[in-house]
Amino acid sequence: MASRTLLVYAGIFLLGLVLLAIGALTQPYRIGAFTANPTPGSEAGESLIALGLTFVIVGIGYFLAWASPTQ
Amino acid sequence: MEESDSGVKYLIGRSAGKSAVIAAFVATHVATMAGLWFGGVRLPQFNFNMLNGWLVLGLTADPVQTFVIGGILHYTSGIIWGVVFALIVHPALGRFIKPLAALTPTNNYIKGVLWGLVLWVISSAFWMPLLIDPLFGGGVVGPFLTKFGLNGVQALFANLLWHSIYGVNLGLLFSPTPAATRGSWRAATGVGVR
């Protein structure tokens, strides 16, 4: 049971990594990202990066909660 | 780990209120800083301090003043949403969703993530379009944050990331668990959580 739970957490984390990688590879870097007037970014690419990071963070959080010594 | 008289112990503090305030402050700060760094991972920057400052001071006020006043408002909001979660939503979720009734770190974490999703919906559906859009004269923010200035739907997902960071931290840090592991498991009823 515990190993299956861990697999689910790992799956969420890996899904996030895949989405993040696809997003990072498919979208061109917006010119002047740190200036006042950057060019528009890629909607699909940046959305995938944001979704990927969300899954990565939620996956890590699951693992941290599971590994809590008070569990 | 501190234990209260209610049979529940918290990661921080001895009461739900104190634990909630500190956990919510940390969660708000981590999410706020992450939002300011979004540009580093090719996402639109989320500067909630400035957005809150513009709401009360307008667009022409001194930027430093806007950032500081907006920051105070933003952190206060984050803490209050955290207290609402800890004292009202957290016990209620345990009652209405039976698998989440037990006070375990994983259940506490899931509740925090769910609360982050709720705040994401509130922010995207109401706060951004109804308050921020008129500030810039209209047409800047799309319905449900499907547009935000130069950004399209990526703003919606960046907002999801921001609120997930808040929810993850809140759920991990506000973590009530039974003080005694044997004989006094009151989690199913939520007793002692308030």
Image: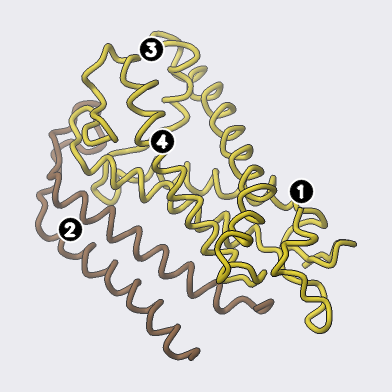
Chain colours: A brown, B yellow
Q: Are marks 4 and 1 on the same chain?
A: yes
Q: Which mark is residue B59?
A: 3
**Circle 2: element type:** helix
Left or right, B165 with respect to B17, comes to left
Q: Tag 2, which chain?
A: A
Q: Are marks 3 and 4 on the same chain?
A: yes
Q: Tag 3, which chain?
A: B
Q: Are marks 3 and 1 on the same chain?
A: yes
Q: Nearer the viewer, mark 2 or mark 4?
A: 4
Residue corresponding to mark 2: A24
Q: CA distance from mark 3 to mark 1?
A: 36 Å
Q: Nearer the viewer, mark 4 or mark 1?
A: 4
Decide: is B41 above or below B183: above
Q: Nearer the viewer, mark 2 or mark 1?
A: 1
x, y (%) of residue A34?
A: 26, 36
Determine the residue positioned at 55% across, 63% down.
B97
Q: Which mark is residue B111?
A: none
**Circle 4: element type:** helix
x, y (%) of residue B13?
A: 79, 56
Determine the residue positioned at 51% across, 64% down.
B110
Q: Residues within 10 Å of mark 4 (few under 14, many from 20)?
A: many
Q: CA distance from mark 3 to mark 4?
A: 20 Å
Residue corresponding to mark 4: B123
Q: Nearer the viewer, mark 3 or mark 1?
A: 1
**Circle 1: element type:** helix
Left or right, A6 with respect to B107, comes to left
Q: Which mark is residue B18?
A: 1
Seen from the viewer's position, the closer of residues B54 and A4 is: A4
Tag 1: residue type?
Answer: Lys
The quarter of the picture where the C terminus of chain A appears is bottom right
Q: Residues within 10 Å of mark 2 (few under 14, many from 20)?
A: some
